[in-house]
Amino acid sequence: MSNQPESNETQDTPEPTTDQARRKFASAGVVGTGVLLSVASRSAMGGWGQCTGSELASGNLSRTGDANPCGCSPDYWWNDNGDRSWDMYLASKYPKTSQFNEVFGVNYFVNSPPVLIGDEVQLRDSSTTLSGCNEGNSSKNGKSIDNSTNNIAWHAVAALLNAEFYGNRYPTGLHSGSAVIAEFQSAFSTAGSDKCARLKAFVARVNVYTAASTWCFGKKH
């Protein structure tokens, strides 16, 4: 996916000091985010909101007009800022040491040792049970990567984190981690040659990061 922001994105890091309410919000998970923000429009035009953790915790329900859509690219979640965001808000529900196959409930990776959701190299470079999906190769940081099979897992984990954290503000129709998992399982369970097409369609659906008004932790992509 050559249109992805590079891994040195400069999205704001989470505040190093959090008050008790923020800590409670983080420890309780972000399942309620979609409820808090259910009145927010996901118009492509956007309007208010920078998609930060403190903004989502407060709800900002008094705002008028359309809320900006939120979603961080895969490159964000595995750079230093995203790493801290993951630790602060999502690690309690989706630890980085979780196995991809167990989280998504499919036998996608056949490696030993298992592929972990926090390991970008494994997600992008490990072999899978799929064949015939490796096409459209590109290069990143001197390493050849494909824009299909291995990138699918990379996008799937980013979508999982975005949906769980941003809820209804994530403009994909997938507003919880469980919704992302169900969508991935449905695509992966497709029989025959349609499997690759369904998985690529899944990536296209969650690849919203270059939309004109999509925000990630205080910055536009």
Image: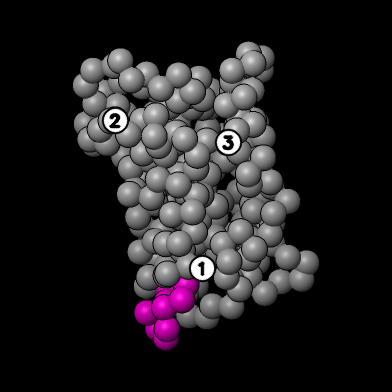
> Residue 6 at x, y = what percent?
51, 40
Is the residue marked by circle 2 packed among few (<14), some (14-19), or many (20+) residues within 10 Å? many
Whether residue 147 can be seen here: no
Q: Which residues are magenta?
A: 188-196
Q: Which mark is residue 40?
A: 2
Q: What is the CA distance from the residue labelled 2 to the residue labelled 1? A: 34 Å
| Residue in front for this viewpoint, 213 or 35 | 35
> Residue 27 at x, y = what percent?
64, 31
Q: Are marks 2 and 3 in contact (CB under 8 Å)?
A: no
Q: Report the side of 108 relative to 193 (left or right).
A: right
**Identity of the residue furthest to the bottom in this view:** 192
Sequence-first tag of 2 and 3: 3
Q: Which mark is residue 149?
A: 1
Sequence-first tag of 2 and 1: 2
Q: Amino acid at mark 1?
A: Thr
Above or below 167: residue 172: below
Sequence-first tag of 1 and 3: 3
Quarter of the figure that contains the N terminus? bottom left
Q: Amino acid at mark 2?
A: Ala
Q: Residue at x 55, y 52 (%)?
A: 157
Please give the residue where the numbered disc 3 appears in the rendered image.
29
**Identity of the residue furthest to the right in this view:** 113
Q: Amino acid at mark 3?
A: Gly
Q: What is the CA distance from the residue labelled 2 to the residue labelled 3? A: 20 Å
> Residue 156 at x, y = what percent?
50, 56
| Tag 1 secondary structure | helix
> Residue 200 at x, y = what percent?
40, 65
